[in-house]
Amino acid sequence: MDMSQYLGVFIDEAREHLQNLDEKLSELLEHQNDPELINSIFRSAHTLKGSSGQMGFSTMMELTHSMENVFDALRQKKAAADQTMVDVLYEALDLLEGMVDSVEKGGDDKKDTSAIVKKLQALLNGRNGDTPDSRAPEEQPDKAENGNAAASKLTFTDYEQAVIEQALAQHQHTFITEVILRKDCVLKAARALMVSNALEELGTIIKSKPSTEAIEKEAFESSIIYVVVTDQNADAVKRAVLGISEIEDIRLTPYESQLSAEPVPSATAASGNSAATGTRVEKPKKIAKTIRVNLDRLDRLLNLFEEMIIDRSRIEKISSALDNPELTDSVDVLKRVSGQLQETILNLRMEPVEQVFNRFPRMVRSLSRKLNKKVRLEISGAETELDRTVIDEIGDPLMHMIRNSMDHGIEHPDVRRKAGKDPEGTLNLRAYHSGNHVYIEIEDDGAGINREKVLAKAVEKGVVAADQASELTDKEIYHLLFASGFSTADKISDISGRGVGLDVVESKIRSLSGTVSVTSAEGEGSKFTIKLPLTLSIINAMLIRTGNETYAIPMSSIVETALERQTRIQSVGRQQVMHYQDHYIPVIDLKDYLQVPVCADSGKPVAGSRSIVLIRHGDKHIALLVDLLAGYQDIVIKPLGDYLSHVHKFSGATILGDGKVALILDCQELVETQKRNASAQNA
């Protein structure tokens, strides 16, 4: 059987199990007496062993089998978890993750696992050779359940009997299916899984003997009994099973001839009457069905929807011009339905940040040992959802900031003790929604940021002019940490101070249309706050006109709008400013800033008739003077491409309803350019 078609599913499921192992192993030392935790760990290892064997990845299968033996010893309380055991298990986990990465890239799982397998076996040697399989006779599963003995007499609950009789009434077949594995079959549980999957594709498995748990433990010899309800005939069932390797034979018997199949009372009673006994039997609960969808298909769906949004804008414009009531009503329906469709499609791309956050507990533990510090990581809001594109890109910036907090922020235990602090530092990683944005915070209770040290280093490196240093606020000083190549480390290490620091973080976050800010209190700790948009593809924007050009401004960057005649603009030196909330805000004439040519037919705007758009980035504001506010609408962001990558005034482009292209203003660049120009003028 060609298993390559299942490779994508295998990789997705393998990563889910590896993530579960990573998460649960971190709790093992404190909760090793929790049977639910141990069983969860065991099931992940066992399932991964079976699926990797099924896919033919023997090295991965052997390694997970060795891990499974350790977990089974914990389940049987024949071993106790300690730090050594957890470290060895994490080492094995790292190796498994490397194998999955290799397989995903088109390689194989061939790695040298001999050293780690020996370490795993050594964890069991302290139990006097009592391995999970060396149980006393009374502890061994009852193998009388297996083989032909099970086939000779099957018993059914009331519910199982009712399901079978309902199937028979609907002219479906019920087969007592005995599958016999070859004597030399190595991975019996894996083969059993393949058989059950094949049977489930043809119908429904009502019962198995031995039980599913016994099959997973390989607590059977070479025969398994399945009771299958299907609309396929016996030949189809045989072909499906015999197509699996290492199957010796299959024997099918129609249920009608199983006169010895005697129903037994059900363990639970619930709603629904059994046709056979008249007793009430439990109805199966409806389970939400899910399917795995390739991300490329979602991207294609989103691209098609983006084209529809563009055409919708054109239809709206045509409808407005024709002023036809029926057309107007139809356009309104189209807007409502497409709006719901937009929300649904964007939600399909949303994923919880949990998958990013879950990689950091192990990193924090590793760095804690390396730095000889005690750090406790607390995670909250992991269920917060972000666009998949953002999820894929945000991991590295978060890693840099966490490393920075552990290296520069949290002090050594003896230093904390002298300062009256808990020797163990706390690092909080949290996420939450607010409006159309997601905020991610990394907060530590360490030494905080030394304001004077940062400022002195910035002056030394020429990041800030000496005569301007005294005018900077604390927030502006803290933000100097994101300057290119800036570091306050006294010595170079492999954790920080290597010239690849927080400037990388801001660059990446800015590419995601986000911002990052820092607050700190010396001696108490620091907090980095990342603000990210929920999605990067479709946004609500204000359309503005200046000259004969139309531009778009993201609504998330707009504070408010006003008519020019409602404000008082005055000149201070060479800069125009306006009064706003007890502050003077720089005013930029967009026509001059973008050097938009004045066309003869456009004429000169009437004094006071132009509009003001107040925009912000972080805590900085500027006002844009434009000719006309043309309304707002949902727009599709299109990248400018490599040819225009040097144009920094725009973050992208969009296609309007009339088919024309409008550039999207980069508000962050506008604010920062104004700040740089003001600094140059003051100098």
Image: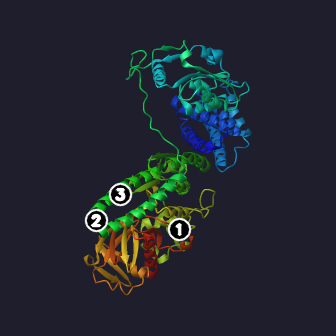
- Towards the viewer: 460 or 156: 156
Q: Indicate the amino acid at tag 3.
A: Leu
Q: Nearer the viewer, mark 1 or mark 2?
A: 2
| Horizontal arrangement in the rendering, residue 27 relative to residue 331 (left or right) | right
Q: Residue at x 32, y 58 (%)?
A: 330
Where is residue 223 drawn, in percent x and y?
65, 22
Q: Which sits earlier in the primary sequence, circle 1 or circle 2?
A: 2
Q: Secondary structure at mark 2?
A: loop
Q: Which sits earlier in the primary sequence, circle 1 or circle 3?
A: 3
For label 3, the crowd category at 10 Å Cα-Cα, with few meaning under 14, some 14 to 19 and many 20 or more, is some
Q: Residue at x 57, y 25 (%)?
A: 213
| Horizontal arrangement in the rendering, residue 312 relative to residue 41 (left or right) | left
Which numbered tag is attached to residue 334?
Answer: 3
Name the residue beneath numbered marker 2: 324
Marks 3/2: CA–CA distance: 15 Å
Report the colour scheme: rainbow
For label 1, the crowd category at 10 Å Cα-Cα, with few meaning under 14, some 14 to 19 and many 20 or more, is some
Name the residue beneath numbered marker 1: 483
Res. 211 visible in picture: yes
| Horizontal arrangement in the rendering, residue 486 relative to residue 467 (left or right) | right
Question: Is 148 rendered above or below residue 293?
Answer: above
| Horizontal arrangement in the rendering, residue 347 relative to residue 456 (left or right) | left
Marks 1/3: CA–CA distance: 48 Å
Q: Secondary structure at mark 1?
A: loop
Q: Secondary structure at mark 3?
A: helix
Where is residue 463 drawn, in percent x and y?
52, 72
Q: Indicate the amino acid at tag 2.
A: Asn
Where is residue 506 drawn, in percent x and y?
51, 63
Where is residue 418 drawn, in percent x and y?
50, 50
Question: Is 585 rendered above or below residue 528?
Answer: below
Marks 1/2: CA–CA distance: 57 Å
Question: Is 598 rendered above or below residue 102?
Answer: below
